[in-house]
Image (spheres, coloured by chain):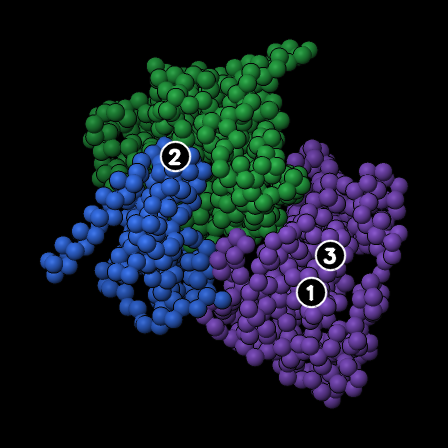
Chain colours: A purple, B blue, C green
Amino acid sequence: MSDKVKVTIDGISIEVEPGTSILNAARQIGGDIVPPAMCYYSKLQGSGGKCRTCLVKVSKGSEKDPRPMPKLVASCRTTVMEGMEVQNITSSEVLEARKGVVEMLLINHPLDCPICDQAGECHLQDLSYEHGTESTRYEFERRTFDRIDIGDKIQLHMTRCILCYRCVYVADQITDNRVHGILGRGDAAEISTYIEKAIENDFSGNVIDVCPVGALTDKTFRFKNRVWFTKPVDAHRDCPKCSGKVTLWYKGEDVIRVTARKDEYGEAEEFICNDCRFETKKTSDWVIEGPRRISPHSVISANHYEQLNPPSVIRTNPALLESNKEEFERITRL
Amino acid sequence: MLKISNTEEVIFSPELVTKFNEIVSRYPEDKQKSALLPILHLVQAEYGWISTPAMDKVAEYLDLKPIEVYEVATFYTMFFLKPQGKYVLEVCRTGPCCLVGAEKIMKYIEQKLNVKEGEVTPDGLFSWRGVECLAACGTGPVLQIGPEYTYYENLTEAKVDELIDGLRLKTAENAQMI
Amino acid sequence: MGRKLLLENINVPGINTFEVYRQKGGYRAVEKALKSMSPEDVVEEVKKSGLRGRGGAGFPTGMKWSFLAKPEGKPRYLVCNGDESEPGTFKDRYLMTYIPHLLIEGMIVSSYALGANTSYIYVRGEMMPQIRILEKAIAEAKNAGLLGKNILGSGYDLELYVQPGGGAYICGEETALIESLEGKRGNPRIKPPFPAISGLYNCPTVVNNVESIAATVPIINDGADEYAKMGIGRSTGTKLISASGNLNKPGVYEIELGVSVEEFIYSDEYCGGIANGKRMKAVVAGGSSVPILPANLILKTANGENRLITYESLADGGFATGTMLGSGGFVVFDEDQCIVRNTWNYSRFYHHESCGQCSPCREGTGWMEKVLHRLEYGHGKLSDIDLLVDVSKKIEGNTICPLGDAAAWPVASAIRHFRDEFEWHVTHPDEAMQRNYGLAHYADPLPKPEGVTAN
């Protein structure tokens, strides 16, 4: 196919459809070179560009215009060009910037993972483990908000929110009436309904699945169990509203939570309706397909974090060794 | 979450709606959302602030979801989402004005009105706050008073006295006339 | 006296009215463009003039115009950026207040060049008086047949509207301005696509600063060559400079690009020197976001040459020893000013104005403000100074829009040039609360450069 576009990421070349973003090209290659993404969500139009964790360096713009791009770019919102060359984990500049972004995301985020319901499946937790620094340099009081119930099934805890806007896109694109949004400005911005309103819609529960952190959680599951003690099982049922394809999370014999099935990037494969999510929690409601395959790297299957295993490209490059010094020291201590 | 207790229904006067209609006519068809900022300014000029029911009414008028109006109204700092004094003294507090004494003027206003930033005087006449650069750096210190946003420049303590006393007098005279 | 192009008639009584403006030769450019030039001719003329965007970035206006996509059946828009919110900049307010028809005339000429039939002037909401002035001027021009249908019988139609902002510095960024004009939060868009391809209502759009639009009038009247004769090198024409701070005569001055900084600050034709007989400590030359320079470096480049008010000369030395012309907001500090306090003030501004969309700016601006507040109020640590530099680097270049850079530069440059003063705030906290660090060595003559030849 000649109309495909060739792009090289960290030395690995791939041909992709024109219009593909750098991030999605990297996902097609897979593995360690895939930039992390906290706000981008492939199923939500217009998402991405905000969190800046997926920044990469474009060292060659294209075959036609080989100049490098002057700034790091958000790989989720930058389209590949023929002959483009991208550096992600092979650029110390990128790693340094990413470390900075992680630090920024964490300065106002509570570091109380032990009591957070999202722990174990929190993207920010993974991100800070893989790309962050060990300690914080932030010495001021963190931003806090009260918990709010948005209806009887969803709880919003703004204190944990990183303003990725994903839940807003869900409401805009998956449901037919958005009642919540981003209010205020700057670091005083918050997700809110302004006047207390329940989000009532057949698909509103998906805001829980797209939330990368513990800001939007399933009230019917809160504090029932840590995710790594539950057993995920794929199941389906005949649902008039959605595909009915879900993951059931078991504790012993009981289904204690229902979620959409998530792919290796934590994205829902298909959005599910609230009936499936909240109302059908008996095994007899479902046709069981078998255990959900969870990446061995996930805390859900491993019950503890894998040690960081840096790709060999870092081990052999002195500049990269230097910029990853802290991570290497951490490995030796572990 | 912000909670607004005011639940009084708002009804826009026909004159106001006429103005709304004129504003909407400035934009292409289906782009009436563009009228949101100008309309919010008109609502604030009419009522002194923008209540939740007023925002809901604006949403209804422009065929928007209420949240779209809340999102915008809370983003821009000129919109008051709670009641203010009749006159809101907005003093520029940014760098260039501070070089020529804006901080002293703010302190003086605080003393004179005897209310803290953002609070309303007991008679309901005044509130004050620091705002960011008003683009009048050459004639600082400067303050503005809405809804027409008249600028008062090269402020001194004497000028602040004159301004505040003048507004008090004007209000008293108006009250007598009624 | 230097030649003036925009403010030539500013002292003529009644120049804000249509009659007087017209008597003084106003709207000649509209007649000339619409009657004797094609839109392409106008674009070419502006390109040839070398006019660079006067809003801050300095991008060539004619080139920006030539990028505008022209798909069939889609309207194109010209939006004038009158959101002027950069601390230290107040030239657009001045221009709109005293000579509004110059902007209207420029809008007609520019809209014609771009093929726009509806154009908007987005003015910050705080400038309600200026909005009224422009609306009146538009009505007058329309009455005279210079706006509306079939302008001057040329077959060209143009409607012009004024749009108020709502109080947000970020709306000076062109894509945030477009969002705001669409009635949304002023969140900058992720580029590409650039407005020239997909801007207002997803149509091709050009956003230009008030002064850039106004400058098209003399360019069309006198020709690009005449305009380009003024100025030096790639800094052609004249520039409005907003002068504020501790000056004898602060105000808006139109200068021919190339006037020396020294002449501008000290001569009686311009600012008349530092107020109250004090000495100059520092200058922010292009609005609050450009790097601050100490007195010695703003008057001379590191090479020992006179610093001129041009895009190139102010940038000479890069960020190590230079700055930028930016929007032309000259903020002058006398010896009694505290750089730490001012830096904190600016960082509060950027924190307050961050839209909150992307994480480095949302979180980093607040962090910098808190650390600077601590330094200013006497409980900072020496390590705070390097922390600030590092945080500013983590923001710079990593955000969706240039507000991140604008927030980072003042902090980084203040520490670069005034590190002693920051350290003194830490080592002498009590004293720093009582008195000021003063002029120190910031106005001392620069050491003679060694082995450097002037180029």
Q: Residue at x 85, y 61 (%)?
A: A306
First in sequence: mark 1 or mark 3? Answer: 1
Q: Amino acid at mark 3?
A: Leu
Q: Residue at x 54, y 54 (%)?
A: A187
Which is more foreground, mark 3 or mark 2? 2
State the residue position of label 1. Answer: A112
Relative image position of residue C79 (x, y in whole percent): 42, 41
Which is more foreground, mark 1 or mark 3? 1
Q: Amino acid at mark 2?
A: Val
State the residue position of label 2. Answer: B100
Quarter of the image for the N terminus of chain C: give it. top left
Q: CA distance from mark 1 to mark 3?
A: 15 Å
- Which quarter of the figure has residue A256? bottom right
Q: CA distance from mark 3 to mark 2?
A: 47 Å
Give the SS element for disc 1.
loop
Q: Amino acid at mark 1?
A: Asp
State the residue position of label 3. Answer: A127
Q: Which mark is residue C431?
A: none
Does B13 sit above or below residue C190?
below
In the image, B122 versus C315, the foreground residue is B122
- Which quarter of the figure has residue A218? bottom right
Whether residue B94 is visible to the viewer of this picture, yes or no, is: yes
1 and 3 marks on the same chain:
yes
| Left or right placement of residue A12 versus residue B56 in this view | right
